[in-house]
């Protein structure tokens, strides 16, 4: 278990940031010490690393909280919910990149567009198949 200063040092952020994220509900202490210090778990450190990664990818704290809240009840294991949030963020990045490419692709001739996208089609199909398999192997919805 980490006290606030230990957690901040391990995550490479300030104690004020840990306090702020706690107030926002992005993280929460596991318990309190006998001296009433907030104690955070290893999972909290992992969550902070994920939050920092998403912030570097230009997600707002509100978007990050939404992702974390969305996946936490779906997967009680923090590592699984963190991975699901990461996967969602990655898919959103891909969607943004595709939207950014649309104006350029619309200016290409159909044959040029087909050549430009030819390498992506098998990868996209593989991603969709992986998600389909994941959903089919999971618990019934």
Image (cartoon, rainbow, N blue to C red):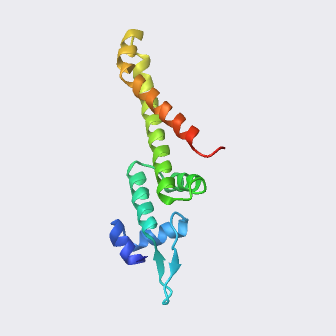
Residue 21 percent across, percent down from the top left: 49, 66
Along the line of sight, the residue nearer the viewer: 42 or 58: 42
Residue 36: percent from left, percent from top: 51, 86
Q: Is residue 69 left or right of residue 126?
A: right
Q: Quadrant of the C terminus?
A: top right
Q: Is residue 40 above or below residue 119?
A: below
Q: Between 114 and 82, which is closer to the camera in this rendering?
A: 82
Image mark count? 0
Quadrant the N terminus occupies: bottom left
Residue at the front extreme of this rendering: 137
State the residue at coordinates (41%, 66%): 45
Residue at 46%, 57% (x, y): give it: 79
Q: Relative to residue 3, is residue 67 drawn left or right?
A: right
Residue situated furthest right in the rendering: 141
Q: Quadrant of residue 46?
A: bottom left
**Residue at 52 percent of width and 63 percent of height:** 26
Pinpoint residue 88: horizontal percent, then vertical percent.
Answer: 50, 44
Q: Taking 57 as reference, is 118 above or below it? A: above
Q: Position of residue 37 (x, y in %)?
A: 47, 83
- The answer to whether residue 104 is left or right of residue 38 is left
Examine the rendered structure and indicate whether residue 84 appears above or below residue 99.
below
Q: 21 above or below 102?
A: below
């Amino acid at each position: 278990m980490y006290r606030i200063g230990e957690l901040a040092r391990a995550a490479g952020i300030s104690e004020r940031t840990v306090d702020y994220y706690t107030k926002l509900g992005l993280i929460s202490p596991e318990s309190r010490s006998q001296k009433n210090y907030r104690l955070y778990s290893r999972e909290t450190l992992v969550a902070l690393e994920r939050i920092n990664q998403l912030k570097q990818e230009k997600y707002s704290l509100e978007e990050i909280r939404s992702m974390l809240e969305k996946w936490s009840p779906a997967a009680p294991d923090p590592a699984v919910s963190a991975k699901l949030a990461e996967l969602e963020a990655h898919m959103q990045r891909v969607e943004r990149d595709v939207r950014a490419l649309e104006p350029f692709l619309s200016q290409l001739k159909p044959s040029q567009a087909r050549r430009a996208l030819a390498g992506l089609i098998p990868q996209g199909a593989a991603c969709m198949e992986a998600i389909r398999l994941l959903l089919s192997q999971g618990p019934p919805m």
